[in-house]
Amino acid sequence: MQIIFRPFIVIMEWCYFLCKNYGIAIILFTLISKIILLPLSIWLQYNSIKMVKMQPELNYMKTKFFGDRERIADEEAAIYKKYKYNPFISIIPTIIQLVLLMAVIEAIKAGMMDGSIDMMFMGFSLAVVPSEVKGLYLLSPVIAALSALLMCICQNKSNVIQAEQSSISQMIMLAISVGLSLYLGFFVSVGVAVYWVFSNLFSTAQLYILNFFINPKKYVDYERLEDSKKQLDELNSLGKKKGPKTAEEKAYAKKEKEDYKKFFSVVNKHLVFYSESNGFYKYYAGMIEYLLEKTNITIHYITSDPNDNIFEMEKTNPRIRGYYIAEKKLITLMMKMDADIVVMTVPDLENFHIKRSYVRKDIEYLYVQHGMGSVSLTYRKGALDHYDTILSPNKKQTEEIRAQEALYKLPEKKIIECGYFILDDMIKAYEEMDKTRTSEEKTVLIAPSWQDKNIVDSCLDELLTQLEPTGYKIIVRPHPQHVRHKKEQLMQLKERFASNDKIEIQLDFSATDTVWKADLLITDWSDISMEYSFCTNKPVLFINTPMKIMNPEYDRIDVLPINIEIREIVGTSVDLDKLDQVREKVDYLFEHADEYAARIADYRDNQVYNIGHSAEIGGRYVAMQLMERAKKKKDK
């Protein structure tokens, strides 16, 4: 080891020969070491920039293959190779610092043994160890720790790599550096502490000098970096919950692990459905029931709800197999999906965390609509671009999808003119409903949407003020999310009209006959307008609250969204600043109810596909596709 340290001892002796002060000699030695190592520091600066420059690509890759550790490791290695980056280079500065520190310790020991060298500096002996003499010498480790603190703060803010680390990582490194400086400062000589202090100060100065001449902002796309970090953080936060898991949560985690393993243990999974929660089964119900009745296909049904009713259904039907997979684990499962057809109601496939399978490229991804509204207005741009097949409920949606494909030069998707399963169920239930009236009193139902500046948030009080003198029965049925988030406000409203038997605030949604028995619906932009009018042929009064626009480019699509078109077909509308017209418009709609019934029926029959037969159309399509695939495999 002496052979390694001898050059450093010689440099220290030379520094002392120049200035005849050992403290200044240590400072000079520290400065010389920084100058000698400057080329290495410049190289490390460029290497750090390279690391941050490729970080967006790494983050996007981790987002794409989230949860698949083996694939991420392979892709990470490929990216490192592409950028010619070696992750082990980052340990070089640490090794050099340790070598220099040990060299300084040996040099000071050599100086102490040389009786001709004066070890005093500013009234303090550089040969003294603070823990042995205490007193003012205890300032030595404190000053060393403060210099480390200053350096860490500056590095966390301005160092190319450290500035991009999480605040927790930064705090851990700060605590280690400061704590180590304080601890070692007690047990090494004051001379070593002087070296440590000035090494930290010179490193801090060097950091800003290098950033000035080699500015990372010239090389790194920080906007893209932030976007990639945000996407990755969103995935990492999925399913996270503070505090220890409850017994129920542990049971769910165990079930998820078992179901994940069970899902991949099944070979030849032909048909897979995915449901976000228990309430989404209704969007598939008709099609699944058709397939169970008319074919021998096994339904593999993934749900992110551990209490989904599908688990009760599979107990009585062996051709239904349910799997509980939470949202985070779902990412990996979908990437490794092996099936012929995957059916979902989730838009933005491939755009966010749910990706198409990279195990099989021939999977047909089939999208089932959960509404009859516009796919240009109420969906994000590109929300359906990565689906192969769309079960379209109406002509408007078909026209919009084709117009989007033409505008953005997208490949044509397969569109099945299917119809809307839920509307068929609603029409059937309405036809079977007892419509006997207990009185001739007209009923007006107010059913707002759950979006910014809806009826509840913007004009409910004034609306009720306008309607109260009409003598009609007024029922306010808020969106369930209103009851969840604004229960106190709605309870106050309920108390306010408690003595008025003409106005009812309904906060219990267990009964649905209120909706269908109402003679008139008042809403804003809720899709309930289509379900209500198409099912009952009764009119709707629309309040023109601010429109919910998910796609800012919707007006580039040369098709008028159905959400806008129907406002003057199935009823009429009123602006927020003209609510004094509400009574007049309600009276008008009642007086012309028969005319509107005919208009609504005509528009519905012209727009909505296969009324009463949509489940059969959807189920038959899936069955035929699976038969065709089976035939092709057999022919091979």
Image (spheres, rainbow, N blue to C red):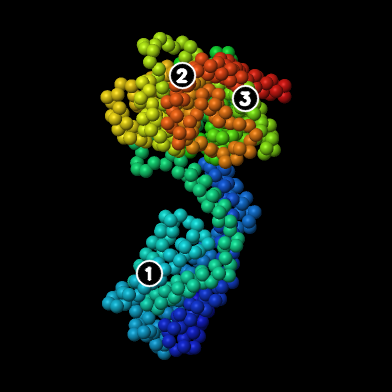
Q: Position of residue 400 (x, y in %)?
A: 63, 31
On screen, residue 408 above or below 197: above
Q: Position of residue 420 (x, y in %)?
A: 55, 21
Q: Position of 143 compared to 50: left or right?
A: left
Mark 2–mark 1 CB contact (< 8 Å):
no
Tag nearer the camera, 2 or 1: 2
Residue at position x 32%, y 75% in the image: 139
State the mark number for residue 590: 2
Taking depth in this image into account, of 278 and 485 the one nearest to the observer is 485
On screen, residue 496 above or below 183: above
Q: Position of residue 425 (x, y in %)?
A: 50, 17
Upstream in sequence: badge 1 or badge 3: 1
Residue at position x 34%, y 41% in the image: 244
Query: What is the secondary structure assignment of the residue under circle 1?
Result: helix
State the mark number for residue 395: 3
| Disc 1 from disc 3: Cα separation | 72 Å
Q: Residues within 10 Å of mark 1 (few under 14, many from 20)?
A: many
Question: Which residue is denoted by mark 1 in the rendering?
Answer: 145
Upstream in sequence: badge 2 or badge 3: 3
Upstream in sequence: badge 2 or badge 1: 1
Taking the view exactly as shown, the residue that stands out farthest to the right is 635
State the mark number for residue 606: none
Q: Residues within 10 Å of mark 3 (few under 14, many from 20)?
A: some
Q: Position of 387 compared to 323: left or right?
A: right
Three-letter amino acid code at the position of disc 1: Ala
The part of the image, by quadrant, that contains residue 217 is bottom right
Tag nearer the camera, 2 or 3: 2
Taking depth in this image into account, of 63 and 26 the one nearest to the observer is 63
